[in-house]
Amino acid sequence: MKLCRFQPLEIEWNAIIGVAPPQRPEPRHGVIRDDRVVQIAGDLYGMWYPLSQSWPRDNVRLLPPVTPSKIVCIGRNYREHAAELGNEVPIQPLIFLKPPSSVIGPEEPIVYPPESLRVDHEGELGVVIGRRCKGISAEEYARYVLGYTCVNDVTARDLQKADVQFTRGKGFDTFCPLGPLIETELDLATTTVETFVNGERKQHAPVTDMIFSIGAILAWISRVMTLEPGDVIATGTPAGVSAMKPGDVVEVVVSGIGTLRNPVVAADA
């Protein structure tokens, strides 16, 4: 099942022609069925039901599928990626945080900060938490997962190296594209992660190449902090990270989910 968060495009069209809606509506949740987005009501993380209102998929703007209280990321979870940056393979999951203010949705621009001389893409599989959890076991992780999405863990590589720790290099506004949707039923045994820059494939790996499994990751994180519904876990990036520049278009493709596409722009654009 494919869940999304969206706004109908007629809202933007009204603004273009000078007809303002009475009040800009809150983002809506929906389920994608074939080529239509059906609005849903209720609790996305509990009981919900479809409404009669729907739109053609091309007539909605997809937003970040969730508004996480935190984004917990796993570093160096693919051996070849650790090697390409000259790092040791961790003996336990290496976790760090990206701020919620870094989240953007599909087609929104990644802003290249003037403080950095190198900004990299890092395409990843994202896990969306569906139930509050603390201290869970690796074996029971699936009970707490709503579904999966695409993540781009954008990184100012030079700042990351200068600071040693990751907060500044990974925490700029627009540095966490999410989307385009949440897939609730994903065959992890066959799922692959790819990243393209201007149509050229830069990264490709099956998620089975991860050093730490999703169950092990969630168990490890939940020993440290409580995970809330809507929180996102970025599970690590394969080898092949490379620099982006203003004018580029980066696409993160996770099989079974879809394509997360974002242009890169200069800060003064």
Image (cartoon, rainbow, N blue to C red):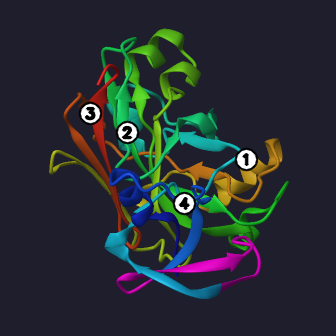
Q: Which residue is mark 1?
A: 221
Picture coordinates of residue 135, whole percent (x, y):
85, 54
The mark found on residue 81 in the picture is: 2
Q: Amino acid at mark 3?
A: Ser
Mark 3 or 4: in front is: 4
Residue under numbered circle 3: 242
Q: Which residue is mark 4?
A: 65
Image location (x, y in percent) of residue 213: 58, 58
Q: In this image, 100 relative to 174: left or right? A: right
Q: Say left or right for 252 vs 4.
A: left
Residue at disc 1, secondary structure: helix
Q: Tell me, yes or no, whether the two marked residues, 3 and 4, touch with CB atoms within 8 Å.
A: no
In this rendering, position of residue 171 left or right of residue 72: left
Residue plotted at (72% across, 63% down):
138
Circle 2/circle 3 CB separation < 8 Å: no
Dots 1 and 4: beta carbons under 8 Å? Answer: no
What is the C-alpha distance between the residues marked 1 and 2? 21 Å
The residue sitting at 41% across, 43% down in the picture is 79
Instruction: Point out the image quarter for the C terminus.
Output: top left
Q: CA distance from mark 3 to mark 4?
A: 26 Å
Instruction: Please check the rendered image and state whether residue 39 is part of the magenta-colored stretch, yes or no.
Output: yes
Q: Residues within 10 Å of mark 3 (few under 14, many from 20)?
A: some
The amino acid sitting under disc 4 is Pro
At label 2, the amino acid type is His
Secondary structure beneath disc 2?
helix
Tag 1 and tag 2, C-beta contact below 8 Å: no
Of pointers 1 and 2, the one earlier in the residue sequence: 2
Q: Earlier in the sequence, mark 2 or mark 3?
A: 2
Q: Nearer the viewer, mark 4 or mark 2?
A: 4
Of the image marks 1 and 4, the number of the one nearer the N terminus: 4
